[in-house]
C-alpha cells in the first residue's frame, strides 16, 4: 500500500469497504492534487463524502443526474485531472452506461469509478437497487479495467493501484459490513494478477468479491471433513483476466467452479468459461452466481445463502462437482 | 471377503513384479543380449484347490510379454505344490519346486540370470555399480506404483476402502533430473492404475520426489527412514502429508507380505 496511509488491520475489521475507500482516497489526495471527487447525491453512502469534507474545492456533487456526472468526469479528465466517481453500481452501469462508454471509455480517459452496493449486497433495498449485471456490462466496454475486491483491504490496494493504471477503471464494492478476508495488505496485489488463497489439487474455486472469504472457509471445511485439496483463487481483476492462472488450474486440477455475486451470464464465470473453451482441454466446470432472474429481497447474508454463495452453498457445490468426470478415460489397466 | 494372504502375495509378485522383467531387459544390455532371438514360454504356477495361480513369460524373438494365467506346452515350467511355496521362493527364500524342461539348459541359465536381477529389489541389495544402482532405483519406483495398484485391484479391504473414498487423484513418484525414472499411481472411486513416467492428466495430489539416485538408495534400503529423509532433503513430499503416510503404510504392508 502507498506510504503514509494510516488505517490498519483493526480498521479493516471495523470499517466498511466504502469507509476504507473514503479514507484511502483522502490520503492519496494529500500528495496528489490532480485527484478530484464526484458523486450523484450519494457522497455519504458511498463514503466519498470523507474526501468532500477534507477537500471541498476538489469535490463536485452532480445531484441525482448520473449521466451528467460521468460527462463532467470526462471533461475533468480531459483537463488533466484524475476524477474518482462514486455512486451505486446500478446507477453507474445502467443509468449512465452510455456516458461511461462513449464519454469515458471511447476516449480512454483516466476516470476511476468506485461503484458501491454491487451485486445483492443492498439486500433489503430491493431488486431495483441490486446490481447483478454490472460486471458483464463493464467488461464488454473496450479500455475498461474491472476490479472486484474481496474485502476492504483489497479495496484499498485496488484504489492505490488504479492510480498507476492509465485509462478508466471500475472498482466494484459492496454495501459495507463485509468481513475481512485478508489479515494484511502486503500479499502482493497487482491489477490483472490473481491471488492463490489456498493451494490444492482436487478442484479450483475461482472467486471474486465476498465469495473469496466464503470459499476460503469452505476449503478448510472440505479438507477436514472430506479430505479434499481445494485451491481457492481470488480473481479480483475480471478484466484484464489472469488467464495464466486459469490455464494452470485446468491442467492441474481439471475441475473448476466460479463463485460470484452477479448474474451467471456475463460475469466472472463467463470470463473463465471463455478461457476454458479456448484452451481446448476438458474440464469439469460449473458457474455459481445469481441465476438468470431478478434477485429476491432480504438481508444480504440470507440472500447469499439462498443463492449458494455462502460457505454451506460452496461446500455443497464442490461435493456435487467432485462426482463429475472431467474427461473420458475408462482405461484402468496398469501400464507396466 | 478378504483375499487369502498367500494368494494375494503370489498374485502381487506375478502381476506387479514380473512385468518389471521387461524393464530389466530393456535397461540391461548384457541380459538383453542373452535373450536376442529367443522365442520361448516359461511358466510359473502354484497348485491350489481354489484354483491354480500362475503367470508365464512369453518371449518372441527376444521381446518379452508377461501373461497372467497358465499356458499350454511351456518350454520350462516351475511348478509349486502350494501357493505358499511359490511365495517363499519368489520372495527370496528356499522352497521346493518341480522344474520341467530343465534340460533346455541354455534357456534355463538365461532365465536364472534374468530372475537374479530382481534381487536388486531386496532392501538388502546395495549395488556398487552405477548402472545397477540406477536400475535398482528405477525398478523400486516402478514396483511401488505397480504393487499399490495391484494390491487395490486384488481387493485388499483397507486399500480398496482408501481408494474408494477418493476422487480422481494422481500419486507421482520421481527422481529429480531423471526423466525415465518416474511412475504414477492413479486412483478414483476404488479403481486404480499404475504406469511408468509422469501422469499429465492433472497435478499430482501427492508427489514423492527423490533428489537423486544416490539419495534415493538409502531410503529404498531402509538405511534412513522417511522422516529423516525428508528432513535431510533426500526426499521432497509435495501434497497431503496424511495421504503420503497412508501410501507409506500400504507399501510397508506389501513388503511384509511378499518378502
Image (spheres, coloured by chain):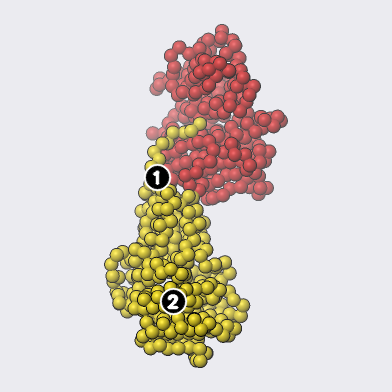
Question: Which residue is nearer to you in this view: A301 or B212?
Answer: B212
Residue A103 image point, x, y percent: 42, 78
Q: Which residue is mark 2?
A: A104
Q: Which residue is mark 1?
A: A327
Residue B11 image point, x, y percent: 47, 27
Instruction: Tell me which residue sits at (31%, 64%) in the image.
Output: A291
Instruction: Tell me which residue sits at (52%, 63%) in the image.
Output: A193
Q: Earlier in the sequence, mark 2 or mark 1?
A: 2
Residue A230 image point, x, y percent: 46, 55
Crowding near pointer 1: few (<14 within 10 Å), some, many (20+)? few
Residue sticking out furthest to the right: B128
What hue represents chain B? red
Crowding near pointer 2: few (<14 within 10 Å), some, many (20+)? many
Say what secondary structure mark 2 lies in: helix
Q: Is residue A292 visible?
A: yes
What hue represents chain A? yellow
Q: Chain of mark 1?
A: A
Question: Which residue is nearer to you in this view: A16 or A262?
Answer: A262
Say what secondary structure mark 1 lies in: loop
Up-down relation of residue A211 to residue B106 (above or below): below
Up-down relation of residue B196 to residue B76 (above or below): below
Instruction: Tell me which residue sits at (37%, 82%) in the image.
Output: A67
Do marks 2 and 1 share a chain? yes
Q: Nearer the viewer, mark 2 or mark 1?
A: 2
Amino acid at each position: 500500500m502507498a506510504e503514509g496511509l494510516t488505517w490498519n488491520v483493526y480498521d479493516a475489521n471495523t470499517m466498511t469497504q466504502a469507509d476504507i475507500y473514503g479514507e484511502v482516497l483522502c490520503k492519496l489526495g494529500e500528495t496528489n492534487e490532480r485527484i478530484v471527487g464526484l458523486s450523484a447525491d450519494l457522497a455519504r453512502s458511498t463514503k466519498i463524502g470523507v474526501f468532500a469534507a477534507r477537500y471541498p474545492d476538489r469535490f463536485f456533487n452532480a445531484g441525482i443526474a448520473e449521466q451528467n456526472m460521468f460527462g463532467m468526469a470526462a471533461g475533468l479528465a480531459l483537463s488533466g485531472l484524475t476524477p474518482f466517481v462514486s455512486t451505486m453500481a446500478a446507477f453507474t452501469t445502467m443509468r449512465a452506461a452510455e456516458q461511461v462508454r462513449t464519454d469515458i471509455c471511447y476516449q480512454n480517459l483516466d476516470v476511476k469509478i468506485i461503484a458501491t452496493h454491487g451485486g445483492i449486497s443492498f439486500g433489503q433495498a430491493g431488486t431495483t437497487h441490486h446490481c447483478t449485471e454490472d460486471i458483464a456490462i463493464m467488461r464488454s466496454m473496450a479500455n475498461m479495467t474491472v476490479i472486484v475486491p474481496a474485502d476492504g483491504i483489497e479495496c484499498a490496494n485496488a484504489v492505490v493501484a488504479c492510480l498507476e493504471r492509465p485509462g478508466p477503471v471500475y472498482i466494484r464494492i459492496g454495501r459495507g459490513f463485509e468481513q475481512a478476508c485478508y489479515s494484511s495488505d502486503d500479499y502482493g496485489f497487482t491489477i490483472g494478477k490473481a491471488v492463490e488463497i489456498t493451494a490444492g489439487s482436487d478442484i479450483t474455486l475461482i472467486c471474486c468479491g465476498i465469495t473469496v472469504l466464503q470459499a476460503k472457509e469452505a476449503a478448510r471445511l472440505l479438507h477436514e471433513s472430506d479430505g479434499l485439496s481445494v485451491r481457492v483463487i481470488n480473481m479480483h481483476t475480471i478484466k484484464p483476466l489472469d488467464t495464466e492462472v486459469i490455464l494452470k488450474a485446468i491442467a492441474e486440477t481439471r475441475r473448476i467452479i466460479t463463485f460470484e455475486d452477479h448474474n451467471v451470464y456475463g460475469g466472472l464465470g463467463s470470463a473463465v468459461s471463455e478461457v476454458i473453451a479456448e484452451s481446448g482441454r476438458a474440464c469439469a466446470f460449473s458457474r455459481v452466481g445469481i441465476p438468470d432472474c431478478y434477485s429476491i429481497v432480504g438481508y444480504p447474508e440470507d440472500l447469499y445463502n439462498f443463492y449458494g454463495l455462502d460457505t454451506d452453498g460452496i461446500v455443497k457445490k464442490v461435493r456435487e462437482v467432485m462426482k463429475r468426470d472431467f474427461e473420458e478415460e475408462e482405461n484402468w489397466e496398469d501400464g507396466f | 471377503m478378504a483375499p487369502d494372504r498367500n494368494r494375494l502375495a503370489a498374485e502381487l509378485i506375478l502381476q506387479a513384479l514380473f512385468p518389471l522383467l521387461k524393464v530389466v531387459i530393456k535397461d540391461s544390455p548384457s541380459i538383453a543380449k542373452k535373450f536376442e532371438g529367443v522365442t520361448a514360454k516359461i511358466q510359473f504356477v502354484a497348485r491350489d484347490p481354489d484354483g491354480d495361480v500362475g503367470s508365464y513369460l512369453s518371449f518372441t524373438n527376444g521381446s518379452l510379454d508377461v501373461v497372467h494365467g497358465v499356458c499350454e506346452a511351456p518350454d520350462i515350467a516351475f511348478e509349486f505344490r502350494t501357493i505358499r511355496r511359490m511365495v517363499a521362493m519368489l520372495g527370496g527364500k528356499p522352497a521346493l519346486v518341480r522344474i520341467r524342461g530343465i534340460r533346455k539348459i541354455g534357456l534355463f541359465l538365461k532365465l536364472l540370470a534374468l530372475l537374479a536381477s530382481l534381487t536388486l529389489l531386496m532392501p538388502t541389495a546395495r549395488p556398487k555399480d552405477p548402472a545397477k544402482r540406477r536400475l535398482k532405483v528405477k525398478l523400486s519406483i516402478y514396483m511401488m506404483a505397480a504393487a499399490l495398484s495391484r494390491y487395490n485391484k486384488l481387493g485388499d479391504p483397507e486399500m480398496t476402502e482408501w481408494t474408494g473414498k477418493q476422487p480422481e487423484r494422481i500419486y507421482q513418484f520421481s527422481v529429480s533430473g531423471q526423466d525415465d525414472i518416474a511412475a504414477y499411481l492413479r486412483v478414483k472411486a476404488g479403481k486404480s492404475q499404475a504406469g511408468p513416467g509422469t501422469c499429465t492428466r492433472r497435478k499430482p495430489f501427492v508427489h514423492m520426489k527423490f533428489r537423486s539416485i544416490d539419495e534415493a538408495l538409502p531410503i529404498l534400503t531402509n538405511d534412513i527412514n522417511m522422516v529423516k529423509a525428508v528432513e535431510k532433503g533426500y526426499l521432497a513430499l509435495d501434497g497431503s502429508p496424511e495421504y503420503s503416510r497412508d501410501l507409506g503404510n500400504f507399501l510397508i504392508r506389501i513388503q511384509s507380505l511378499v518378502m
